[in-house]
Image: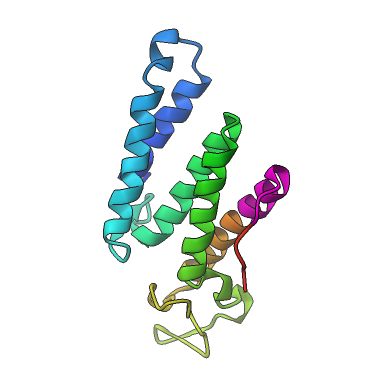
Amino acid sequence: TLFPKPFLPLFFLWAIHFSKDAELQRLKPEFLDLVLDSLSELLREPLGTQVVGTTNSPLHNLLLAILLHTSVATYFFAHGRLLEGNYHSNNASQLAICAGLHRTVDPRQFQTASGQTAESPGSPGAGLLPRPRHLKDVLIRCYHFWNAFVLDRSWSAVAGAPSPSWR
């Protein structure tokens, strides 16, 4: 599939948000519950993988959970629900830190030699994710880090809320 299954309720939720149909607007709470349930499902097996896109490249559920948390946070911020948005933004940040995404090897330094990473620390964090095997893995981890970091820092400043340490 082009998108991982946990993201389908989120897409429907955003579609309803942009719809003018009052009948659809009443479905928002149901789809929001489905999105939040999807987060729980992803974190039950954080190292499980799901195939994403047309290239059949698997992503770890932990990375998908980080992305889903940032997406849900954006949804809440767009609806003026700052407390809930901040909660999901902080969850994304903490998961990114636990996964060691803030210490992912610089993509410019990543080298492969017969399928092995050369001198790359991977994602040391709590050892939740295996070392990246390909440059694409490194780039995906960098994207997830910056996505969570920028969202967290931006909305922490707007809401005047504390933000987690990124050290």
The vertical placement of 109 against 92, above or below, is below
Identify whether 112 is placed above or below 62. Answer: below
Question: 116 or 4, which is in the foreground?
Answer: 4
The residue most toward the bottom is 119
Task: Tell me where residue 118 appears, x and y as whole percent.
Answer: 50, 89
Rendered view: 129 above or below 145 = below
Drawn side of residue 158 relative to residue 78, left or right: right
Which residue is drawn at the image coordinates 38% and 76% (left, top)?
130
- Residue 8 forms part of the magenta stretch: no
Taking the spot 54% from the left edge, 74% from the top edge, the residue there is 104
Q: Quadrant location of the N terminus? A: top left
Coloring applied to the structure = rainbow
The residue at the point 37 percent across, 50 percent down is 54
Q: Along the line of sight, which residue is nearer the eye, 4 or 114?
A: 4
Q: Position of residue 85 (x, y in %)?
A: 55, 41
Residue farthest along the top direction in this orientation = 22
Residue 119 higher or lower than 62, as above or below? below
Q: Residue 5 in the image: state x and y as whole percent.
A: 31, 43
Whole-percent x, y for residue 150 in the image: 65, 54
* Residue drawn at (36%, 52%) of the image: 52
Q: Which residues are magenta?
A: 150-162
Image quarter hosting the C terminus: bottom right
Most prominent secondary structure in the magenta stretch? Answer: helix
Whether residue 1 is visible: no
Q: Taking 164 as reference, is 5 left or right? A: left
Nearer the observer, 40 or 133: 40
